[in-house]
Image (spheres, rainbow, N blue to C red):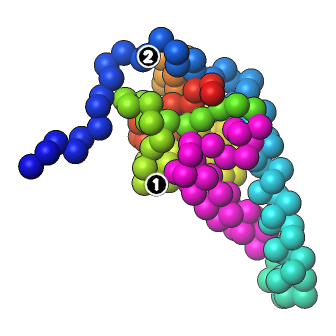
Amino acid sequence: MPDTKPMIRKNKPSDIEFAEIGWRILAWIIDFVIILLITWLLMILFFWRTEIPFAFVFQILAYLIGLFYFSLLESINGQTLGKLIVGLRTVDEDTFEVSSFTENLKNCILKCHWFPCIIDLIIGIFKNSEDMEKKLRIMQNFSNTCVIRT
């Protein structure tokens, strides 16, 4: 039976450049604006006259759309629209290939809303202080992913 495990690189290839925090934040802001626009559109179409509190529905819907948006797009080619515009890609830390859907889901669980994303970033900065080039957020430790320039 052939070995189907992906090749694991112990050292990063010389042509790989890890993304800087400024570019990553810019890509996240672009993605966040896209998610908010989609959420507003759905709120107007489906929840215009409901008795449910608008802010509650909006927050839940925005989180779910964000989770779907980040997880799906990063699983297809490692890029959301924001990362595509800025020139970044989320990849597996060992193979530098696009990560699986489950790994991307773990990575995206906290970055779909601004508050948990900030907490994730702050904890990640302190926890990953010796590996700041590769990992900024704590959830990247659990998903074994990193963000590179394309």
In-image side of 84 versus 76 (left or right): right
- Callout 2, which amino acid? Pro
Residue hosting label 1: 101
Q: Nearer the viewer, residue 60 or 22?
A: 22
Residue 144's quadrant in the figure? top left
Chain part drawn in magenta:
57-85
Residue 25: image tag: none
Q: How many numbered discs, if any?
A: 2
Mark 2 surroundings: few (<14), some (14-19) or many (≥20) residues within 10 A? few
**Residue at x 31%, y 19% (from the top left corner):** 10
Outermost left residue:
1
Q: Main secondary structure of the magenta part?
A: helix
Disc 2 element: loop
Above or below for 68 versus 12:
below
Q: On the picture, is 97 further left or further right than 74?
A: left
**Residue depicted at x 87% and y 81%:** 45
Q: Which residue is mark 2?
A: 13
